[in-house]
Image (cartoon, rainbow, N blue to C red):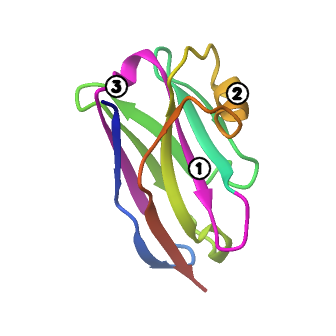
Amino acid sequence: QVQLVESGGGSVQAGGSLRLSCTASGYTVKNGCMAWFRQAPGKEREGVATILTNDGSTYYADSVKGRFTISQDNTKNTVTLQMDSLKSEDSAMYYCAAPGFFVSSASYCYAILSRATNVYWGQGTQVTVSS
């Protein structure tokens, strides 16, 4: 059984940083694609960043490029999202996701996970940025 568990959310002032972690069990991080999504109240869920874990290639939403960094730690079966220069509009529930099928690129992972049905999701971790 696949489980994705997020941690690291919290409250921070604008301009600050947070580091989110997603630890997978029953799913081998190094052989797939992992992603971070977020959803703010009243808004649709949106992709934030993805990483193709067999080669480390990444893809970012335009809104977070240059501020967020996704990375992996295969020894811990964990993917992290380092969030710097946080803005109030980054406030949302952040979810970790992984496909239950093969994905060949980080950009395709970003595009397909929001629409596919065979996707594993974590329970989410709240990020609140105050201005």
Which residue range is magenta in the image? 18-44
Q: Is residue 95 above or below residue 9?
A: above
The residue carrying pointer 1 sits among few (fewer than 14), some (14 to 19) or many (20 or more) residues within 10 Å by Cα, namely: many
Residues under numbered marks 2 and 1 in contact, where contact means CB atoms less than 8 Å apart: no
Q: Amino acid at mark 2?
A: Ser
Instruction: Assign a secondary structure to mark 2.
Output: helix
- Are there few (<14), some (14-19), or many (20+) residues within 10 Å of tag 3? some
Mark 3 and mark 2: Cα distance apart in space: 21 Å
The number of discs equals 3
The span from disc 1 to disc 3 (Cα, nearest Å) is: 18 Å
Quadrant (top left, top right, bottom left, bottom right) of the C terminus? bottom right
Q: Which residue is mark 1?
A: 37
Left or right: 117 as drawn, with respect to 27: right
Q: Which mark is on residue 107?
A: 2
Q: Residue furthest left?
A: 75
Name the amino acid type tagged 1: Phe
Mark whose residue sits in front, 1 or 3: 3
